[in-house]
Image (tube, rainbow, N blue to C red):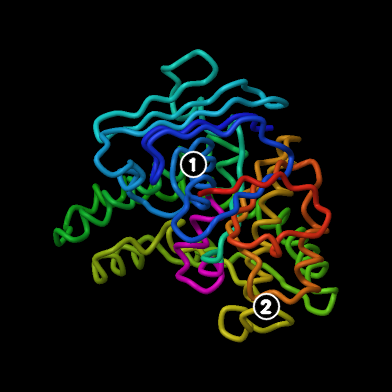
Amino acid sequence: MLNELRLQQFRCFTEHTITLLEPKNAFLGGNGKGKTSLLEAIYFLTRCRSFRTHQTRDLIHWGGGMLGVSGDFSEQPVRRLKVEWSVDDRILTINESSNASFREYWGQVLSVVFQNSDRHILQGPAQLRRQWVDGLIASVKPDYLQWIQRAQLLLKQKNAFLRKNAQDRGIWTSLTDQQEEGTRRIHEARIAFTEQAAPVLETSYQILTGKKECLRMTYEAEIPRQLIRTREKLWEMERQFGTAQLGPHRDDWKFQLDGKMLRAFGSEGQVKSGALSLRLLELQMMHRQTNRWPLLLIDDALNDLDLGRKEQFWSLVPPEAQLFYATPQLDQLPVRAGFKIYELE
């Protein structure tokens, strides 16, 4: 459990400390008061990145040169985590050791964030679904992160080679051999993930919707199509298109609601319910793999849901998970839920 959170030069906060955090916490305030920034700081502390921007420099308080976020924990493998970041450096601290590597830091404390933009995982391009799946696998299997990074590097190298009107078959063969090896390992991890995740997602969605609808998740892997291609055909195709036609960057997942594609036919409430189910799935999968509940961050993500689905959502939130909810209005919180309220002026 996170007991204390300290911010330095983070977003709208020059310095800010919240102590004696409770199992259920609500950050209350109007627009621009820093509610979401507090959730973002907790996420940044656990993930070393933001859920709102890809540019870490945007998190630094206006006029500042660096930022720092630290937290004290109980009932976790670590007592203290700290991230310090500037344009020139990043320092990760675990307990009293301030020279931790990213691989050592990653996964020490887990977190899951619910936000309105989660619907883009279901409705957006395949890249978003790959990022979501890969991030979840890497949360519980840190070595997987290295496989993905290597696959991205090989893809970049191969595309650069192909764009230069490639003629050297030997270079292409070497890059393709390396790609196939990495693709198989990633493919196997993604298959195992989908087999575990699909029934959990289906159950969460059915409970959330009162068992009126069924959401199914299936893995559309590129590798079966790759295996039927001869090397000669692949060589010709990649030279023709100038980009790699093999690799995990071509995988996708389908989400079907009662047999129809959710992204195309789902209503706003159905898509929102699907997005919430994805995050509930993250919670369950992380707990299964680590026997620890992640910190649960909710950024006013229950609008567009009717009262029944809201009540079902709260019934699916594990009481053991520490919860942080950002909202402008108290009536968004469940009645008698025992939240500690932090009002932001």
Residue 64 is left or right of residue 116, and the answer is left
Magenta-colored stretch includes residue 325: no
Range shown magenta: 119-134
The answer to whether residue 236 is above or below residue 338 is below
Given the image, on which type of amino acid does mark 1 rest? Ala
Q: Name the element at disc 1.
A: helix
Magenta-colored stretch includes residue 124: yes
List x then y, in percent, for residue 236.
28, 68
List x then y, in percent, for residue 240.
24, 71
Q: Name the element at disc 2.
A: helix
How many neighbours does mark 2 have within 10 angstroms: few (below 14), some (14-19), or many (20 or more)? Answer: many
How many neighbours does mark 1 have within 10 angstroms: few (below 14), some (14-19), or many (20 or more)? Answer: many
- Main secondary structure found in the magenta portion: helix
Query: Which of the 4 image quadrants contains residue 293?
Result: top right
Q: In the depicted view, which residue is nearer to us: 336 or 229?
A: 336
Q: Which residue is mark 2?
A: 270
- Label ID, residue 41: 1
The answer to whether residue 295 is above or below residue 17 is below
Q: In the depicted view, which residue is nearer to us: 184 or 84?
A: 84
Q: Of callouts 2 and 1, which one flags the residue occurring earlier in the amino acid sequence?
A: 1
Query: Which of the 4 image quadrants contains residue 118?
Result: bottom right
List x then y, in percent, for residue 36.
51, 52
Q: In the depicted view, which residue is nearer to us: 266 or 314?
A: 314
- Residue at (63% x, 66% y) in the render: 275
The answer to whether residue 173 is above or below residue 330 is above
Distance from disc 2 to disc 1, alpha carbons, whole Å, reads 30 Å
Count of numbered circles in the view = 2
Given the image, on which type of amino acid does mark 2 rest? Gln
